[in-house]
Image (cartoon, rainbow, N blue to C red):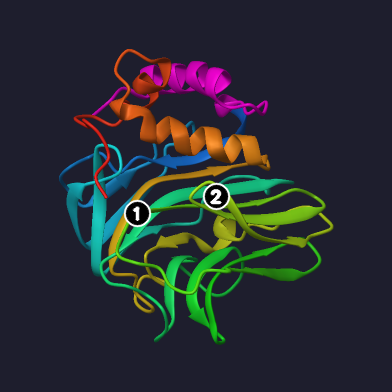
Amino acid sequence: MKKLAYLLATVAFLMSCVLAHAVDPDKDLLIYLPFDEGKGNTAEDVGPNGFVGDIKNAKWVEGVSGQALQFKGGSVNFDPLKIDQPEEMTIEFWFKPDEKIDSGARIDLLYRLQGGGRPHVTFNRGGILFGYYFATQGVELPIHTNYDAFESEWYYFVGTQSKKTGWMYINGELDNETEAGGDARMDFGTQGMCIAASQGNANFFNGMVDEFKMWSVAFTADDVKASMEATLAVQAEGKLTTTWGKLKSGSDGIRF
């Protein structure tokens, strides 16, 4: 297991070089799950808060960079995250469905461990194929995809909100946006967090998830592209971004 101090120092240096926006990992990074353990039943946050999640019905597999988790009727469950409400927020991660998703029953990629609230990332909710469901302190809002289907391949998701606007990006490109108008609301602090299911026991996502991060700032379009390209750059030997990608142990490139 990588030492936290080394990881944070390396992340801080690389993010300052790679991201166009003034993102400070020491201050702005709320949680980072590289899913690199490769064994065991816990997923460790290597960011400054050090959260630990319990894994159920998932196996370790090769991911976008290093290891990932593949779920089948499973989830990663976190007790309430003891962090302050951010005024702005970004959630980013990679996912790969086991099978094509173009309709069907509800599937939650990201939800709370206990009760309702926001944010969540969901397939097949109310006749909408896919959406990022977020909130301000005053209102709950959706951002709906323009995709017609999600194939069994890797996708890079970003949901981000400033005090004025919410955006959803897929594979580095803007998918859709909506007006927000107020500080972010993040209910993981009181109700816990569940990846690949709803409350750990329903609406299961069957597939792989990798490189999950949550930030207390809104990403710009340049930040989104830079973060995506930094992960994909693991094949570029000798470049600075290679080091960022190889924070994921044992990766020699991306395979779709």
Q: Secondary structure at mark 2?
A: strand
Q: Against 132, is 3 above or below?
A: above
Looking at the image, how many numbered discs can be counted on the residues? 2
Residue located beneath label 2 in the image: 91
Above or below, comparing residue 181 to residue 201 in the picture = above
188 inside magenta stretch: no
Q: Residue at x 39, y 34 (%)?
A: 231
Residue 10 in magenta stretch: yes
> Which of the 4 quarters of the picture holds residue 39?
top left
10 Å neighbourhood of mark 1: few (<14), some, or many (≥20)? many
Q: Is residue 162 left or right of residue 150?
A: right
How far apart in space, not on screen, are marks 2 and 1 (Cα)?
Answer: 17 Å
Which mark lies nearer to you, 2 or 1?
Answer: 1
Residue 16 position in % (x across, y down): 57, 19
Point out which mark residue 154 bears: 1
Asked if one can make out residue 103 in the rendered structure from this viewpoint, the answer is: yes
Location of residue 7 in the rendering, given as x and y in whole percent from the top left corner: 38, 22
Rendered-image quadrant of the N terminus: top left
Residue in view at x 75 percent, y 48 percent: 162
Name which of mark 2 and mark 1 comes first in the sequence: 2
Magenta-drawn segment:
1-26
